Image: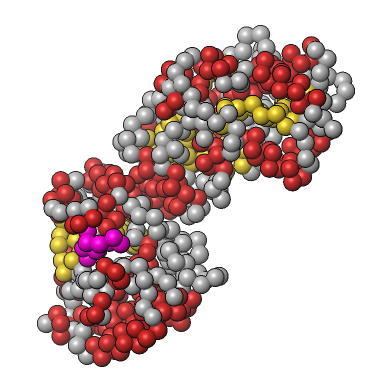
Amino acid sequence: MLNSVLHLKENIFDTPDQAATRDGFGKGLVEAADADSRVIALSADLTESTRVEAFKNKYPQRFVEVGVAEQNMAALGAGFAEAGKIPFITSYAAFNPGRNNEQIRTTISLNRVPVKICGMHAGVSVGPDGATHQALEDMALMRVQPNMTVISPCDSEEARKATIAAAKWDGPVYMRFGREKTPIMTTTETPFEIGKANVLWNAHGAHAQVAIFATGALLYNALRAAQELETQGIGVNVINVHTIKPLDKETIVAEAKSAGAVVTVEEHQIAGGLGSAIAELLAAESPTPIEFIGVHDQFGQSGTPTELIEHYGMGVSHIVEAAKRVMARRA
Amino acid sequence: MQPLTDDEIRDIAHRANDIRQTIIEMLVAAGSGHTAGPLGMADIFAALYFRVLNHDPKNSEMPERDRLILSNGHIVPVRYAAMAHAGYFPVEECLTLRKFGSRLQGHPERLRLPGLETTSGPLGEGLSQAAAIAYAFRMDNTSQRVYCVMGDGEQNEGNVWEAFMFAGKYQLSNLTAIIDRNNIQIDGYTETIMPLEPLADKYRAFGWHVLEVDGHNIEQFVAACEEANAIYEKPTVIIAHTIAGKGIKSIERDYRWHGKPPTADEAKLFLHELRTMEGKVVAEHE
């Protein structure tokens, strides 16, 4: 059942409200800028689709158009931060941090300056654009850089909060956002703290037999899977791991220990993302069987978001099956 | 600013010679590192730290300081030596270059040594940062100047031209780029590896004010920096023609000295050559 203390939306399972996480980012950016005059935004010729437009209209003097030049944008971001600004550098995740990875490494992470890297259109759910634009390795690229914080918000409201929190965070942050409208699960009242995972769904009655850790919009599929599993008499907990780095080790280890079986869910390559991060943690702290939901070493392709999510094995039924498989592997 | 007096030129030339000696000493102690580039830029770094820059070695975070971004981080021995002679840290510390635990990393790291402004080594990223700092100063309506030293081989990097385009578009007149035009890079001569000429025309086409100087003529270089201060509608790039390895006749212009240090025996000869030049350094300009 849904955790009642988190103030989640009540209509999640029947007629959920929908918005893209990039829309939440756009709102959060304006709010962050209202609160702190050091906040500026850079765009690489994608101001509308990255949802930086509202910021640009309200704060034209704090908006910097850099053209189609993501490498320059990253190093410019570092320079602005060295001069005391809090720059948000924005483009599609395939280019930012895909194209400009080394500039981020040297001038942002190693320099430890508070640049906020915002990657839009992450995952296969970009849909028709095809493999070139479907970033599936962005979290892996960012997670391995020292000093970097990595956030993958689950819905537009969490994206708004994450953006505001990132502006206040002392250091580099990578945030990934989606293009498509996806269900809104959280409300303005739902707590959000960088590095603190939330248990959104608790097994009814007895303790959970599987802990499902999910990040990004696929969290919704994880909740639907939990609901389905409950009707089959299988109790699970669903945990929203919006911060991939630093991981909420305490919550993750406790949930994994208690359940004895784990499923991870992300719209990203299995290699290097949430599943890898949790596997690394549990291997050291509390070895637990894990099933990984995500993309298995493949590129995406054109299609509708739903077609692609199903094709690559990230649908509700896939999560249900993964939970059953991992239960069978429990010690 | 008043024109340089002969005494001032002589003083800066002596500082450059001190810097060159320190470069040789630190490279020998390190046992690795780049020789030709740092020696070739010693006159310019002496002019920057002892004349051009508004800075305070005892207060490296002074907000109103000018910013010097070193984009081609591999020539950092010249910056470390100039900083040490300017009083940022003891000259003896230069001998810790590239050693475990040293603040003087093989390529400069901002978080390790106050006064560095940024981290560099991977080429092509400094001008972007310098341009952003210049832009931020304009946003904040402050009057500091930003200098960015780059290599000529570095101009092969695409990121460099993105930054030239950006600074040209925004007319960042508080930005001065300095190109170490020594015509060598690791694999050979720049015009063989990936021709840059006509370099000045390229910068002009990107909306920059272009000056060319003899990078060993302190008076010319300082005058160019001052001219840049009086250009209000464009950023300025100074193409400084330098001789790689300058000061050590036997290695001058030899690209094989790009990335290796002298041996202890070579260093003895090099230091002797520099020390016996002390009285002649200014005569060369006269």
Q: Is residue A180 magenta?
A: no
Residue A41 % position (x, y): 41, 38
Left or right position of B142 against B181: right
Return the residue found at the far top.
A14
Examine the rendering and report whether any part of residue A308 can be seen.
Answer: yes
Quadrant of the snapshot with the N terminus of chain A:
top right
Residue shown at 40% from the left, 58% from the top: B120
Residue B233 % position (x, y): 18, 49
Q: Nearer the viewer, residue A235 or A27?
A: A235
Residue shown at 80% from the left, 25% from the top: A327
Q: Nearer the viewer, residue B11 or B199?
A: B199
Left or right position of B247 against A246: left
Tell me which secondary structure the magenta stretch mostly adopts: strand
Q: Which residues are magenta?
A: B178-190
Residue shown at 19% from the left, 61% from the top: B239
Q: Is residue B180 magenta?
A: yes
Left or right position of B212 against B36: left
